[in-house]
Amino acid sequence: MTDSEYRAKTAAVLASIEAAVDRWLQDDVVDIDTQRTGGLLELSFPNGSKIVLNTQPPLHELWMAARSGGYHYKYVDGRWLDTREARDFFDALSACASEQAGVALKFVGAV
């Protein structure tokens, strides 16, 4: 993957997450605040916990820090997969966000 492809894919991932959070806020599902600075997206939950998503351009990775731990993802065969367990990024983000929000949330996004 080229650097420009990486930037486009990670920008699409972060934008899809922001769009989902905006929809949930409008539909009164959950109040998650987002703050984005370049390749870093911070999700702040009502209980004070956070999930931080960060692009890592030199490694072509996407990183997630959540209450349950830190995870690194590489783009493989059309999906962002955890470098340790090959778990799908959106599945892991959904699980972490659901736990931290106290309500079932499902992220589905751009790859």
Image (cartoon, grey):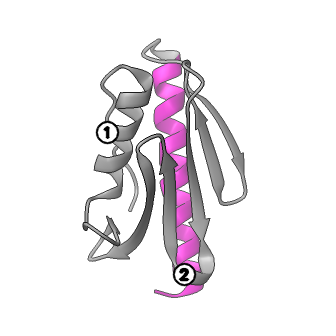
Viewer-proximal residue among 13 and 61? 61
Name which of mark 1 and mark 2 comes first in the sequence: 2
Question: Mark 2 — residue?
Answer: 59
Viewer-proximal residue among 39 and 66? 66
Does dot 2 land on a helix, a strand or a loop?
helix
The answer to whether residue 16 is visible is yes
The amino acid type found where label 1 is placed reads Ala
Residue 18 pos. (x, y %): 55, 40
Q: Which quadrant holds residue 75? A: bottom left
Q: Residue at x 34, y 40 (%)?
A: 94
Viewer-proximal residue among 15 and 81? 81
Is 2 within the magenta? yes
Q: Residue at x 35, y 30 (%)?
A: 98
Looking at the picture, does residue 55 appear above or below residue 16? Answer: below
Say whether marks 1 and 2 touch (CB < 8 Å).
Answer: no
Mark 1 burial class by Cα count in 10 Å: few <14, some 14-19, many 20+: some
Viewer-proximal residue among 83 and 41? 83
First to last magenta residue range: 1-25
The amino acid type found where label 2 is placed reads Leu
Does dot 1 land on a helix, a strand or a loop?
helix
Residue placed furthest toward the right: 37
Q: Which SS does the magenta portion mostly show?
A: helix
Could you give the CA–CA distance between mark 1 and mark 2, rounded to whole angstroms?
25 Å
Residue 49 pos. (x, y %): 56, 30
Question: Mark 1 — residue?
Answer: 95
Residue 85 pos. (x, y %): 25, 66
Q: Which mark is residue 50?
A: none
